[in-house]
Image (cartoon, helix red, strand yellow):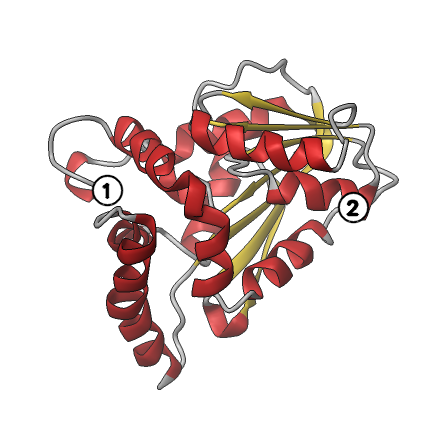
Amino acid sequence: MSESSKNVVKPYYEEGSKKEQVTNMFDNIASKYDLLNRVLTLGIDTIWRKKAIAMLNPNDHKVILDVATGTADVALELNKQLSPTQVIGMDISSEMIHHGNQKIAKKNLQNVITLEIGDSEALKYDTDQFDAVTAVFGVRNFENLAKGLSEMYRVTRPGGKTVILEFSRPKMFPFKQLYNFYFSKILPFIGSKTSKDDKAYTYLYESVQAFPDYEKFGAILEKVGFRSVQWKSLSLGICTIYTGIK
C-alpha cells in the first residue's frame, strides 16, 4: 500500500520528499521536543508510553529495536520496565539522536541502549534479529507507510511482537470537537512560539488527520504479515496502541 502523492502530508513545502522534510523538521525542534511533549500533552504522553511498553514482557523481549526513537524516551522506558539485554534506538534525525544520547549518558546506560541514525524504510538490521520492535509517534512520519511497516516485520523474529503507539482521531462528541480545536489552533500556536518552527506543529495535526487509524491501520499491519493484530484506544481516542505478532 503506497501513498499517492496527493495524500502525502509534508511539513513544509511541495518540493522535496517527505523524508527530507521530516528530517529537517525534527532537527529544527529537537532541543525543545521533550519540553513541548510534556507541556502540550500535560504530561500524559509519559503515561501513554508506559502503557504501550507494558504490552511487552521481560521474559520474551530481551533484544528490542525502537524505530523513530527520537530523544530516547521509549528506549529508556523499555530499559526501566523490561531490563532487556539490548535496546537499539534508531532515528532519521541526527539532532534527536544527539539529545537522546545525552539522556542515556546521564543514566550511564550506554552498555544497554545504543542510538543510531537510520532510515525506517530501509533498516540496516538482519532479518529476524529482534524479539520486539516498537514505534511511538513515528510511523505517521513514514514516507511510505507499508514499506516502513514491512521493514519492521522483517527484522522481528518469528513469534516476536511489534508495539506501535500513534495518534488517532477521537470519535466521541463533544470531545472530538474540543480535541480538533486544541490540536488545530492552540497546539500549533504554542509549538511555533516555543520551537521557533512555524510548520512543525501544524504538520502534527495535518498528519494525524491523514493517518489511517483504528481498523484501517490494523488492516495494513495484517497485510504486511503481522498476525493477532489488536488495538486499544487511550484517552478517549487521542492515541491508540497497536500490537501484532510475526
- Is residue 75 in view? yes
Task: Please give left or right for residue 9 compared with residue 222 in the image.
Answer: left
Which sits in the foreground, 103 or 75? 103
Q: Residues within 10 Å of mark 2 (few under 14, many from 20)?
A: few
Vertical position of residue 79 compared to residue 24: above or below: below
| Cα gap from disc 2 to disc 1, whole angstroms | 33 Å
Corner quadrant of residue 45:
bottom right
Q: Which residue is drawn at the image coordinates 36% and 52% (left, top)?
A: 212
Corner quadrant of residue 43:
bottom right
Task: Please give left or right for residue 120 compared with residue 192 in the image.
Answer: right
Mark before the other along the chain sequence, 2 or 1:
1
Q: Which mark is residue 80?
A: 2
Q: Quadrant of the C terminus?
A: top right
What percent of the width, then of the height, locates residue 69? 55, 36
| Mark 2, secondary structure of its residue | helix
- Is residue 66 in view? no
Vertical position of residue 226 compared to residue 201: above or below: above
- Residue type for callout 2: Lys
Which sits in the foreground, 30 or 138? 30
Extreme-right residue of the structure: 59
Q: Which mark is residue 11?
A: 1
| Mark 1, secondary structure of its residue | loop
Vertical position of residue 12 compared to residue 156: above or below: below
Which sits in the foreground, 49 or 57? 49
Which sits in the foreground, 171 or 73? 73
Q: Residues within 10 Å of mark 1 (few under 14, many from 20)?
A: many
Q: Which residue is drawn at the image coordinates 53% and 34% (left, top)?
A: 99
What percent of the width, then of the height, locates residue 22? 32, 35
- Residue type for callout 1: Pro
Q: Which residue is drawn at the image coordinates 26% and 46% (left, top)?
A: 197
